[in-house]
Amino acid sequence: MQGELVNLTNAIEAARKSGRFFCKFLTPNDAGVNGAHQDGVYLNIESWGLFFNEISIPETGIEDRLVKIHINDWQEFESRIVYYTSKKEFRITRFWSKAPFDRNEMVGALIVFVPLSKDDYKVYIFNSEEEIEGFSQTFSLSLADNYMVYREDADLVLEKTFKDKVFELVAGYTDFPETSVMAEISRRVFNEYYNKKKVQPDKDLINWIDTEYTVFRLIEQEVYKDKLIKPFGELQPLLDFASSALNRRKSRAGRSLEHHINFLFTNVGLPFDNPGKTEGNKKPDFLLPSTNYYQNPNYPEENLILLGAKTTCKDRWRQVLSEGERVPNKHLLTLQQGISENQLEEMESARLQLIVPKPYHKQYPEAYRDKIWSVSKFIDYAKEKYIFLK
């Protein structure tokens, strides 16, 4: 744990000093565990400027160069940045054979590339919830699309009409709204801006979460504008402000997923308690059909559903297992973009059914994709189970 904290602290310091970085969740193809012949981490074309500076993207042939990779407490080594125009493929190769990581355990980890100079890159890999959330929340990153190109001096570029819609819905707020209100604003912004008539649970859950990052950043800019313009004068007030801002980001992100799931279930008429209450002080995120049914010893156990909701779940999935003794088969809905085969085997042995938005299934090992449920599949499963309650 101490090592993870040091790694995270070093990464945040390096990223802030550089002011630029590229990060992404590692897929099975990135880690080379799906049996493909390609080797190396795929880079999104939007990160071109971080790896090839201002050189324009070629239309034919191959563009490549060698760079030095620096990993904490590991000898620096050379990797190759390469772009194949014929396949539109942008990768960093000669990485896994030289890096001190077990690629089989890296699926779903967050990798960060921080440019130190034109030819030198610091690389960090975060493989725990604390590290992933600590880094992403520090820089208020939305990783709904799997990757992020961060530039400290870059403005938040949005279409004017979208920005106007956000400000229309948050007009009058001089402080941050409650997390549930923030989630509701985000859904309204997305649904009204894109004229959504019908909810698509898997796609829309991702879209709402992504929109909420944008909404929060715009509100953050508005609420903090005076503090950001006026110098603090002393170090301690600055540190207090930074700590308060980060805690607020963590609080919003921690509840966001639950709020949107709550809306989805309410929208389709599912009975549930959020949170539920089982034995003692245990409070699972969602208990279906309700706490009262759970507490009724005559209600059939096979008709109870215990659902955890966790943005990331590489370690925390085990928490769900102990949250309800009457429910032997647990469910977990997560936005985690990939998990190693070993972890998926553990979940299966523990009788935990993983639920992931359908667009993220391709980021899981191929052998397990058919075993993962989509959000829509879970909703259909629960609706059929509780149709008699309507």
Image: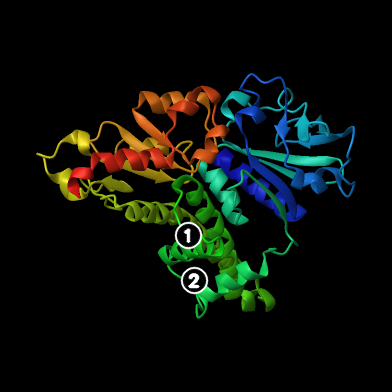
SS for callout 1? helix
Looking at the image, which residue is at 49% across and 55% down?
253
Image height of 293 relative to 62, above or below: below
As shown in the figure, which amino acid type bears the numbered disc 1?
Answer: Arg
Q: Which mark is residue 252?
A: 1
What residue did someone put label 2 on? 176
Looking at the image, which residue is at 50% across and 39% down?
358
As shown in the figure, which amino acid type bears the numbered disc 2?
Answer: Phe
Disc 2: CA contacts within 10 A as few (<14), some (14-19) or many (>=20): some
Q: Quadrant of residue 82?
A: top right
Residue 55 left/right relative to 94: right
Residue 21 point in image, percent of width and height? 73, 48
Image height of 187 relative to 102, above or below: below
Residue 317 left/right relative to 295: right
Q: Nearer the viewer, residue 51 or 237?
A: 51
Callout 2–callout 1 Cβ contact below 8 Å: yes
- Spatial CA span between label 2 and label 1: 10 Å
Q: Nearer the viewer, residue 151 or 234?
A: 151
Q: Quadrant of residue 327?
A: top left
Residue 10 point in image, percent of width and height? 67, 46
Residue 41 point in image, percent of width and height? 71, 32
